[in-house]
Amino acid sequence: MDTRVSDAELEVMEVLWASPHPLTATDVAERIPSERGWSLATVKTMLSRLSAKGAIRFSEEGRRYLYTAAIARDSYVGRESQRFVDQLFGGRLSPLVARLAEADALDKDDIAAIERILKELKS
Amino acid sequence: MDTRVSDAELEVMEVLWASPHPLTATDVAERIPSERGWSLATVKTMLSRLSAKGAIRFSEEGRRYLYTAAIARDSYVGRESQRFVDQLFGGRLSPLVARLAEADALDKDDIAAIERILKELKS
DNA sequence: TCGAATCGATTACAGGCGTAATCGAAAGGA
DNA sequence: TCCTTTCGATTACGCCTGTAATCGATTCGA
């Protein structure tokens, strides 16, 4: 349903989403960007909490668990995006675009990509 | 700096941002959407916390305080938007647009508005 | 065989958040 | 002059988060 994950938990989700196959806790820890500076224990806590909230699943492989994401990145990100524009922009995307445009946060490529998407939409 | 406010606190900020003049705690409480169902005490807690984090200011009017936002909505929203696209879309807006487009979250008007903004940008 | 390493589970602990109730001081009404 | 109301400040309290340490069980290496 509307499972939400914290910022730190999201880091773990990204690792699982990026992997084509299930990962052990150690595997996950190894793939967490080192800037995070997490201990293995911390990663294990995240995995437990994510299991508890149903965002990931695991199967047992001997004494170890193999974790996989239980929700798709696309749908998670879609829900969060909707939520975001609802909360700050009354559900409309254009004010967000305007805000980022003013802040020079859009480069040529990004702009071109957006235009392509919109053109496609209208056809 | 990078003051962040919680969802509930944001509700209070919106009230202050929407008012052309300072408001007392009671004024704020009256303007909070009633679906929230907050008691006056809750609103006062929010005001204290927001003051503590520097998001709002107050001046004393007799025994009461008159509150005003200390940060502009525009800049707050700008920072949060940047943060959001950085976190979920690697800093690019187009994947967000794509995601919302797929979810049919864009209506004709919104699309037209976005196109206008982009056209303006390129000129 | 036996100590070391490793596993997931449990516990820890401070700070933030949502949602108030209570408190002492002041002001206002009768 | 009191009692009531109202103000901001302080306290409450349970859940979530970030960041682990510890524990009992198992496995692995020597």
Image: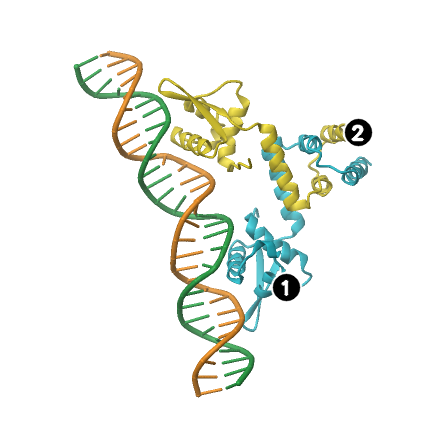
Chain colours: A yellow, B cyan, C green, D orange
User: Which quarter shows the C terminus of chain B?
Assistant: top right
Q: Is residue B113 left or right of residue B24?
A: right
Rendering coords of residue B67 (x, y %): 59, 62
Q: CA distance from mark 2 to mark 1?
A: 45 Å
Q: Is residue A56 left or right of residue A96?
A: left
Looking at the image, residue A82 lies above or below residue D29: below
- Please report, as a chain letter, where disc 2 is located: A
- Please report, as a chain letter, where disc 1 is located: B
> Which of the two residues, B47 or B111, is positioned nearer the viewer here?
B111
Tell me which amino acid carries mark 1.
Answer: Pro
> Which of the two residues, D10 or B36, is positioned nearer the viewer here?
B36
Rendering coords of residue A70 (x, y %): 51, 27
Give the residue at x 73% y 37%. B106
Rendering coords of residue A61 (x, y %): 40, 18
Residue highlighted by disc 2: A119
Q: Is residue B44 left or right of residue A91?
A: left
Rendering coords of residue D18 (x, y %): 45, 38
> Which of the two residues, B61 or B29, is positioned nearer the viewer here?
B29
Residue B70 visible in this rendered orientation of the protein: no
Disc 2 and disc 1 on one polypeptide chain: no
Looking at the image, residue B86 lies above or below residue C28: above
Instruction: Label 1, secondary structure: give it.
Output: loop
- Which label is found at residue A18? none
Residue A83 visible in this rendered orientation of the protein: yes
Is label 2 or label 1 in front? 2
Instruction: Label 2, secondary structure: give it.
Output: helix
- Which label is found at residue B22? 1
Tell me which amino acid carries mark 2.
Answer: Lys
- Disc 2: CA contacts within 10 A as few (<14), some (14-19) or many (>=20): few
Residue B60 sits in quarter: bottom right
- Disc 1: CA contacts within 10 A as few (<14), some (14-19) or many (>=20): some
